[in-house]
Image (cartoon, rainbow, N blue to C red):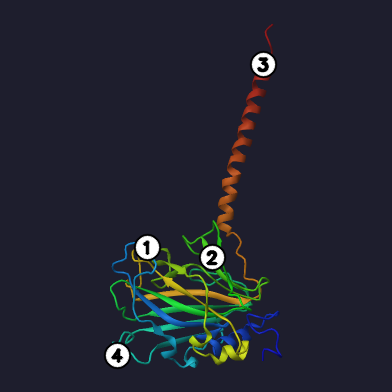
Amino acid sequence: MRGSVECTWGWGHCAPSPLLLWTLLLFAAPFGLLGEKTRQLLEFDSTNVSDTAAKPLGRPYPPYSLADFSWNNITDSLDPATLSATFQGHPMNDPTRTFANGSLAFRVQAFSRSSRPAQPPRLLHTADTCQLEVALIGASPRGNRSLFGLEVATLGQGPDCPSMQEQHSIDDEYAPAVFQLDQLLWGSLPSGFAQWRPVAYSQKPGGRESALPCQASPLHPALAYSLPQSPIVRAFFGSQNNFCAFNLTFGASTGPGYWDQHYLSWSMLLGVGFPPVDGLSPLVLGIMAVALGAPGLMLLGGGLVLLLHHKKYSEYQSIN
């Protein structure tokens, strides 16, 4: 497929239609999405960790391998109207019944036009992008203050890993108190990207009071034989590939956390070509206009007062 079609999603030079993107998502998620594999669900015990920036985040529990999960029938959640579907799963072997009333869900959605989702972090999307939302719901944590994370493996382009970038802004209207945007770029042009805000949420709907910090570790090369073999990845990108891996962790030992409502959600944007670029929101533009315009209006008003004051005294005739 790769030899005959040069616009494979995330790596070629042309953008597929939203319907094709959606079809690819249904066959690829939750493994092999854009050449990415969410490998493991991580859990840490942060009970005795007082430093919010500490690494590691606490004592690690044995991770949950997503290769050992049982997933739902996708037709139950298929929604052609919104081009979305939800993959919901739980461990096939769960002797402690940690997931007896819980699940790990991957919701994938393609878009037919440029807009923003209704829920934070409201990343700007275009018709060439898809959104992946990960939600951990109702699973029993193995500690009183457990922090969770994801181990993600992704394809490198050539011998190098994708580049990870941080962008900072003064605008937080769409994701309150979050002034940063993280992204992975494949190639210098680039040919594909993954983009997310470093924030997760411990309640639904998400808001500032339930925001959790999201930290991404540096990318490092990963051995292909140590990864679950994905036929989707082999079909789209061939068998000879270089893989890179990184961890995403959500939350801190203090503040809100998964323990509040046994809920955790995080989302990212995936697409071809250059990632969408956020401009300043109308609210921030209005504030800047007022802040910059007010001094000018004050100077103009002061000048007019002085001019009228001078004219008033110039109307008097000298007695001499």
Q: Position of residue 54 (x, y in %)?
A: 38, 64
**Neighbourhood count class around disc 2 (C-alpha, 10 Å): few under 14, some 14–19, many 20 upward:** some
The residue shown at (39%, 67%) is 55
Identify the residue at image location x=42%, y=75%. Answer: 149
Q: Which residue is mark 2?
A: 181
Q: CA distance from mark 1 to mark 4?
A: 32 Å
Q: Decide: few, some or many residues near mark 1? Use Cα within 10 Å; few <14, some 14-19, many ≥20.
A: some
Report how far apart the C-alphas of labels 2 and 1 lie in the structure: 20 Å
Q: Amino acid at mark 1?
A: Thr
**Which residue lies under the disc numbered 3?**
316
Q: In whole angstroms, how far apart are the C-alphas of marks 4 and 2?
A: 39 Å
Q: Which tag is nearer the camera, tag 2 or tag 1? A: 1
Residue 52 got which mark? 1
Q: What secondary structure is marked by label 4? A: loop
Q: Earlier in the sequence, mark 3 or mark 4?
A: 4
Q: Earlier in the sequence, mark 4 or mark 2?
A: 4
Query: Helix or strand or loop: what does disc 3 sit on?
Result: loop
Under mark 4, the amino acid is: Pro
Q: Quadrant of residue 294?
A: top right
Which of the 4 image quarters holds residue 26?
A: bottom right
Task: Please state which of the two labelled residues, at mark 3 or mark 1, is closer to the viewer.
Answer: 1
Residue type pointed to by label 2:
Leu
Label 3 and label 2: CA atoms lie apart by 65 Å
